[in-house]
Image (cartoon, rainbow, N blue to C red):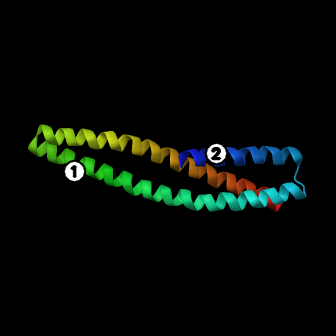
Amino acid sequence: MAKKLKQLILQAEKFLSDYDAKAGGEKTGQDLSRLLSYMERWLLYFQHERLIHLIVTVLFGLAAMIVLGIFVMVQSLYILILEGLLMVLLVPYIFHYYNLENGVQRLYDLIDELYKRKET
């Protein structure tokens, strides 16, 4: 999904640069409307994925904090190993969510730019 998000962002950025170079026109206006509807459809998927990844990231973070608290009380090697496994999963989730959130925010900006071009 991250690959599709990057592809969509690049496609919109390329369209905007081409649109500005051609200075509008009827055909590019139709292409603009098609691109906007396509991007808005994908935006719904990205928003859903962003919500799911936020929930998973928060739950893994919460689990890591609980296991860390248990380790402080019990000081067992098995609990420390469990904490390590949770951290191995949590760190990539945080990076993935960070990239997903920034990509969706960039997509919002691009959709706003496309709407500005459509209004003029």
Q: Residues within 10 Å of mark 1 (few under 14, many from 20)?
A: few
Q: Is residue 67 above or below residue 116?
A: above
What type is the residue that disc 2 sits on?
Gln
**Which label's residue is closer to the chain start, 1 or 2?**
2
Q: Judge whether residue 77 can be spotted in this image.
A: yes
Determine which of the numbered discs, if any, sits on residue 7 in the image. 2
Determine which of the numbered discs, if any, sits on residue 118 in the image. none
Relative to 41, is 80 on the left or the right? left
Residue 14, percent from left and from top: 75, 44
Residue 105, percent from left and from top: 58, 51
Relative to 15, is 44 on the left or the right? left
Q: Judge whether residue 115 can be spotted in this image.
A: no
What type is the residue that disc 1 sits on?
Ile
Determine which of the numbered discs, if any, sits on residue 66 in the image. 1
Residues 7 and 87: in front is: 7
Residue 90, percent from left and from top: 35, 44
Q: Quadrant of residue 71?
A: top left
Q: How many marks?
A: 2
Looking at the rendered image, the quarter that the C terminus falls into is bottom right
Residue at 77% x, 47% y: name it.
Answer: 16
Relative to 43, is 53 on the left or the right? left
Tag 1, which secondary structure?
helix
